Each structure stands twice: as structure tokens, then as C-alpha cells.
Image (cartoon, grey):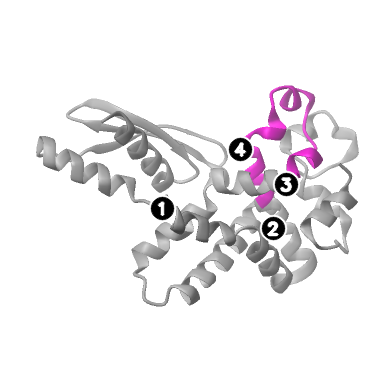
Amino acid sequence: MNLSNLEENLGLKFKDRRLLEQALTHRSYLNENKDKKLVSNERLEFLGDAVLSLIVSNFLYQKFSSSAEGDLTNFRASLVKTPTLAKIAQKIELGKCLFLSRGEEEGGGRENPGILADSLEALIGAIFLDNGLAKTTGFVTTHLLPVLSEVIESKTLKDFKSLLQEKTQAKDKTSPTYKVLKVVGPDHNRIFTIGVFLNAKKLGVGTGRSKQEAEQEAAKAALEKL
């Protein structure tokens, strides 16, 4: 799929096509194309992450005027976590347009949830720089915020850590503990792997782009086993 088709899927046009190209350039692609003096999408991803958080936070603050801070935080986490962003990237066929190295391509990089989520954030950063906050808000409202209704209606938005704590307290009179098992990636884009333990026994493992997300995934995995 060419960039014009992608713009049609996005519902907008880029004034500076170079920003769009940069948003689609994975760092692996640079290694095989050093002569082209390309820039990876990591800086745009950093910006897009912040812009996305602002737009989602403002939406939730306005929509759920009586919700507590903890509930708003959980809502936001469900929207900006890797699986959700990757699903949206797949819907707009973002993976077909990514610039990847041969190795990343052969390894299934176009369907990799982490790469798709990161690239979507980079795209949001590029839209913000090229079209401004209003157009970026329109894009997020169209493609991401409808997911919130699905999450609420299907009751999939749960605090798995609290559920696990309630279950272990009732059964074993003790609380689970969480331990960071591995951290990979640069400072602005870390992936955490966290284990949840009960009396030194590992109950589950989860990964995420924040400790909070990884702990929730670990608790979810533990609940599925109990």
C-alpha cells in the first residue's frame, strides 16, 4: 500500500510528506540504508505518546466528570496499552507501509504488536506536527476513543491486581508481591517483564510498556491459573 492510500485510511493529507515517511521508519531500516541519511520514528513516537496521553486524558476528564482519579487512570491505561494501539494500527493497515529491515520483515515485524503500537504513536506525533492539535484530536477521536465504549460495555476493563489481591487474601490470608524480571529497550521506550509471586511461588508473568501495565498483565495471568 502506498502513502496516498494510507492517507485515505487516515482521513487526512500531510503537508510535509517527510514527516509521514519518518513516522513509518523503524530503526532497523536505518542499518540497511545508511546512505539515505534517514531518521527513525523514535523521536516522533516520544512526542506522539505525550500527545495521545493529553488527548485521551482530556476526553476522559470531560466525559466522566464524577469518576475518581484511579478510575480515569485505569480507563486511560486500557486505551493506550500496546494491544489496543496495535489493533487500531491493524485497522488502518499501518503495517503495510512500515519501512523495516529485511530481518525484521522476515521475523513478522509488520504484525508485531510492539512495532505497530510504537509506529501508531509516531504517526500521531507526525500528525500533530503537520496538522496541529485539532486534527490530531479528530484522528484519535475517530480511531481510538470508540474502543473505550467497547471496553466499558464488554466489562473487560478490570483492575486485575485488586482482583488477585482479594482472591489471595480470602484464600491464603496473604498478598501477592511483584518483581521486575527484565527491562529492555531505550529509556523512552522500555518494555517491562514482571512476575507476581505468592509465598515465593511464581503465579504469573506479564509484559508492558510501564510497570503498571506489566503488573496488571501478570495479575491477569495469575488469575487465569487460580
Query: Which residue was labeled with disc 3?
Result: 41
* Magenta run includes residue 56: no
Residue 191 percent across, percent down from the top left: 51, 38
Query: Which residue was labeled with disc 2?
Result: 124
Q: Contact, CB < 8 Å: mark 2 with mark 3?
A: no
How many neighbours does mark 4 have within 10 angstroms: few (below 14), some (14-19), or many (20 or more)?
A: some
N-term mark: 2 or 3:
3
- Residue at 52%, 41% (x, y): give it: 190
* Residue 25 in view here: yes
Q: Residue 113: which numbered mark, if any?
A: 4
Closer to viewer: mark 1 or mark 4: 1
Picture quarter with the C terminus = top left
- In the image, what residue type sits under mark 1? Leu
- Mark 3 lies on a secondary structure that is loop
N-term mark: 4 or 2:
4
Task: Give me the C-alpha separation between circle 3 and circle 1.
Answer: 30 Å
Closer to viewer: mark 2 or mark 1: 1
- In the image, what residue type sits under mark 2? Ile
- Mark 2 lies on a secondary structure that is helix
Task: Give me the C-alpha separation between circle 4 and circle 2.
Answer: 17 Å
N-term mark: 3 or 4:
3
Q: Main secondary structure of the magenta part?
A: helix
- Mark 4 lies on a secondary structure that is helix
Q: Residue 157: which numbered mark, if any?
A: 1
